[in-house]
Image (cartoon, rainbow, N blue to C red):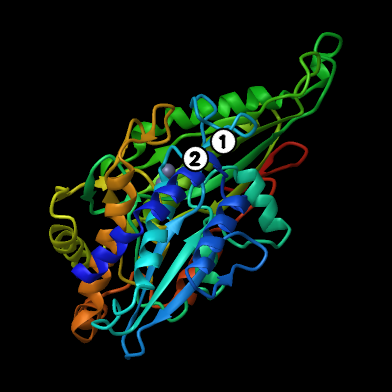
Amino acid sequence: MKKLTDAVQKYEKLILDAERYIWKNPETGYKEYKTSKYMADTFRELGYDLVMAEGITGFYTVIDTGRPGPEVLVLGELDSIICPEHPESDPETGAVHSCGHNAQCAALVGVAAALKEPGVLDDLSGRIRLCAVPAEELLEIEYRNNLIKEGKIKYMGGKVEFLSRGYFDDVDIAFMLHTSNTYHSANGGVGCMAKSITYKGKASHAGGSPWNGKNALYAATCGLNAVNAIRETFKESDVIRVHPIITSGGSMVNAIPETATIESYVRGATFEAIESANKKVNQALCGAALSLGCNIDIADIPGYAPLYNNKDLLNLTKEAADIAIPEREFFHSEYFSSGSTDMGDLASVMPAVHPYAGGSKGTSHGNDYYIEDPVAACVDSAKLQVGMLYLLLSNGAKRAKDIIDNFEPKFPSKKAYLDYLDSLNRSGDRIEYTENSAIVNL
Ligand SMILES: [Zn+2]
Ligand SMILES: [Zn+2]
């Protein structure tokens, strides 16, 4: 393993330069043009041939050791979040890497550079796929929903999009290290459904003839209150989180708002819990529309699958950390996060793990988030990742093969999983008014 970690060390400057460049050029999901290009240029300079994602950002490359064995996918996420209050956010877009994905990309550069050093693959079998993946953060739902309508993407998250396109066919195991304040792992995290909601009323002069209008904004605020009123019906064990925002609520003050729009997630620990809570949320939202005689279009869009980290891979991560980066404390915590990631989608069909690398400080997604220790966040993260690859693929890839044999997938196949996701998709007006009644479709 030392050959590999030493190889990472050799590229410290390349890694740290990537961290700074990407921090200074934050871009949100499916818009990571500069970031994807920077990463692709860096990979090509290292001697890689790349498969670029068609029509969207991101790419992958496959390294073959020349000896038979399983294929391990290692990912780095390209996208930023939006937090205009952050002092170093992009003044135009408000984008900033307050989730530390810039450090993940830098670490992936380190992994890529190390794997090109002579002799490092000698002890390994099988293949390694390195992927710079777009769009992990689930935001700008309206923008992504439009990309879906235009046929440019099928899914909100970059990993499930890549999965559906066949970019991860032949992959047997997947992992990535997410940036955090400490080196640790958890059991997993909730999945989610994304929602794009439009209340539809009727415009009228707000002073002259408000009685002719139907106020979509008031319907939307009633909807939010109704959602708040059902929160105590959510079971703790289901870890349901519903956190809507109003994205528009009228265009001028002297007209009754004709439309009001809301984005939300419904998060939960299992798909069953998400579906059940989502139905209740729709009921609350529709009831509010009904009370004002408005209509409501709800687009239910599959977000991310609940993440259940593979136990064998959790053990392997800790083992690799103790050897590859002994000076960093790595701990496992038996918690289930209420945050979501599309690593959950990959973990639904293959053994996968999503541990955390330290080195950042402040609040994730907040205005005080920084990469405090880039060596910890990027260089040591790359060392841990090559350490994991070594444990998986050395010795004839025995560990990787055992993990694959032990794995019980949540879904029998990629197709079965994607078919399930597709079955969650629904959109359109939910209320049908007739003369003296209304039919509500939840
Ligand atoms: Zn995040
Ligand atoms: Zn993140």
Residue drawn at x 66%, y 57% is 148
| Mark 2–mark 1 CB contact (< 8 Å) | yes
Residue drawn at x 45%, y 70% is 417
Residue drawn at x 68%, y 55% is 147
- The residue pinned by badge 1 equals 285
Residue type at numbered disc 2: Val
Tell me: residue 93, above or below residue 52: above
Tell me: residue 72, above or below residue 17: below
The quadrant holding residue 277 is top left
> Mark 1 packing: few (<14 Cα in 10 Å), some, or many (20+)?
many
State left or right for residue 161 relative to residue 250: left
Measured as percent of width and height from the top left, residue 231 is found at: 39, 33
Measured as percent of width and height from the top left, residue 263 is found at: 57, 38
Q: Nearer the viewer, residue 182 or 198?
A: 182
Q: Is residue 423 visible?
A: no
Q: Nearer the viewer, residue 136 or 148?
A: 136
Tell me: residue 401, above or below residue 79: below
Measured as percent of width and height from the top left, residue 364 is found at: 37, 36
Measured as percent of width and height from the top left, residue 132 is found at: 49, 61
> Mark 2 packing: few (<14 Cα in 10 Å), some, or many (20+)?
many
How many numbered dots are placed on residues in this image?
2
Residue type at numbered disc 1: Leu
Q: Is the N terminus in the top left, top right, bottom left or bottom right quadrant?
A: bottom left
Instruction: Give the CA distance from mark 2 to mark 1.
Output: 6 Å
State left or right for residue 130 relative to residue 5: right
Q: Nearer the viewer, residue 379 or 417?
A: 379
- The residue pinned by badge 2 equals 281
Dot 1: element: helix
Residue at mark 1: C-beta within 8 A of ligand 1? no
